[in-house]
């Protein structure tokens, strides 16, 4: 093969590799958190806009200009003030600058409390954080447990009211379709089912359906049995909910669910603290998914156990007596 052919082949590989890298860069989020406000004035050139994006550490100016020219989008960029989440990709940012909005996928996880929903939504949406927060907390008052965890496609500038409406409507639809028919057979009311399912969601993670049903049965047995009429449920997740946002020094971050509870934590003065108050909490402590709701209405009737715990390896251990429960705690490191 001649030198010219080698040179041509090398040039071709360089172009292909460079193009692949360019496409890869365009598909990656520009950051992991936070938002930047960008003002695009009427009449600004593509290069001027690119420089603003570059200075804000959103998109390299050259990359932005090249992509806009390549896609012939010069005349489609709109003037305005934009709240740009750093979780967007360069392609999404260019899309946002054309229309001011587009649909984005939000995935809310099982077991999140409404404040976690809010923090996650703020990290993804192009909205005014302060105004959205106030509206979201107002709209979700009394709806803890009734905001269905799922994936939603919403406008990136959606209002809090619209988002909460979607979350709650989805809960109503899923409950009616999958849970309601089993409600009567469970002997529980809807509010009790959601309340117990929320605790179950936080108390279980990778448990099987049978394990979730057994743990739900233990919780309900302790709640209903005359033997426990003067006892307490002692569900750790209710204490975590009562404590609220806590600083995790080991991980260097704020968390809504404190990992290691202390004796002082168990004495926190809150109606949600089932170490201090008998019966169910005043309301759900989180938003349960379908598996937890179904495990609650299909709970194991009168299980032989009074206690359960999760070992460090994730395995569930049950106990009939307090002495057995204390021995089982040796599996927690």
Image (cartoon, rainbow, N blue to C red):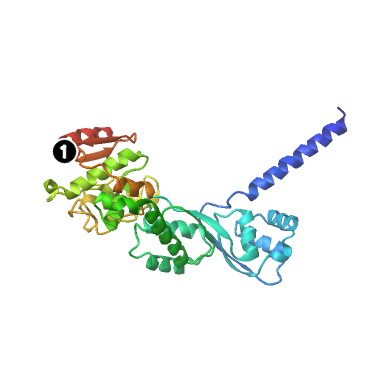
Give 99 or 261, whichever is nearer the viewer: 99
Residue 20 appears left or right of 321: right
Residue 326 in which image quadrant: top left
Q: Which residue in the rendered view is the most extreme toward the bottom?
A: 42
The answer to whether residue 90 shows anywhere in this view is yes
Residue at position x 66%, y 54% in the image: 60
x and y percentages locating residue 92 in the rendered image: 61, 56
Residue at position x 45%, y 56% in the image: 120
The answer to whether residue 333 shows anywhere in this view is no
Q: Give the SS element for disc 1.
A: helix
Q: Quadrant of the N terminus?
A: top right
Give 116 or 301, whichever is nearer the viewer: 301
x and y percentages locating residue 47 in the rendered image: 72, 62
- Which residue is tagged 1? 322
Q: How many marks?
A: 1
x and y percentages locating residue 32 in the rendered image: 52, 51
x and y percentages locating residue 178 in the rendered image: 38, 51
Q: Which residue in the rendered view is the most extreme toward the top?
A: 1
Q: Quadrant of the C terminus?
A: top left
Give 9 or 299, whichever is nearer the viewer: 299
Residue 124 appears left or right of 280: right
Residue 100 appears left or right of 238: right
Residue 102 in which image quadrant: bottom right
Other-residue count near label 1 (Cα within 10 Å), few / some / many at <14 / 14–19 / ≥20: few
Residue at position x 47%, y 66% in the image: 162
Residue at position x 34%, y 57% in the image: 145
């Amino acid at each position: 093969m001649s030198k010219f052919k080698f040179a041509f082949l090398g040039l071709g590989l360089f172009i292909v590799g460079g193009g692949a890298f360019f496409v890869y860069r365009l598909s990656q989020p520009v950051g992991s958190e936070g938002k930047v406000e960008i003002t695009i004035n009427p009449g600004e050139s593509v290069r001027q806009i690119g420089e603003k994006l570059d200075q804000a550490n959103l998109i390299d100016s050259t990359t932005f200009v090249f992509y806009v020219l390549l896609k012939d989008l010069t005349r489609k960029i709109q003037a305005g003030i934009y709240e740009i989440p750093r979780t967007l990709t360069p392609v999404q940012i260019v899309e946002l600058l054309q229309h001011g909005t587009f649909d984005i996928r939000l995935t809310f996880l099982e077991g999140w409390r409404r404040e976690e929903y809010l923090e996650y939504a703020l990290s993804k949406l192009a909205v005014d954080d302060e105004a959205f927060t106030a509206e979201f907390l107002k709209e979700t008052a009394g709806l803890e447990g009734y905001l269905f965890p799922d994936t939603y496609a919403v406008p990136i500038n959606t209002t809090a009211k619209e988002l909460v409406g979607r979350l709650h409507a989805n809960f109503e639809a899923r409950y009616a379709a999958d849970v309601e028919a089993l409600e009567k057979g469970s002997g529980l009311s809807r509010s009790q089912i959601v309340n117990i399912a929320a605790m179950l969601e936080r108390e279980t993670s990778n448990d099987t359906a049978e394990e979730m049903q057994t743990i739900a049965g233990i919780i309900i047995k302790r709640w209903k049995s005359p033997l426990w009429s003067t006892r307490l449920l002692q569900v750790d997740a209710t204490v975590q909910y009562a404590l609220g946002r806590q600083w995790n020094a080991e991980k260097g971050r704020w968390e809504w669910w404190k990992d290691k509870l202390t004796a002082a934590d168990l004495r926190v003065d809150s109606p949600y603290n089932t170490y201090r108050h008998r019966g169910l909490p005043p309301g759900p402590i989180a938003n349960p998914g379908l598996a937890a709701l179904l495990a609650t209405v299909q709970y194991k009737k009168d299980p032989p156990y009074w206690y359960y715990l999760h070992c460090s390896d994730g395995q569930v251990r049950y106990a009939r007596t307090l002495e057995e429960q204390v021995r089982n705690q040796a599996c927690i490191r």
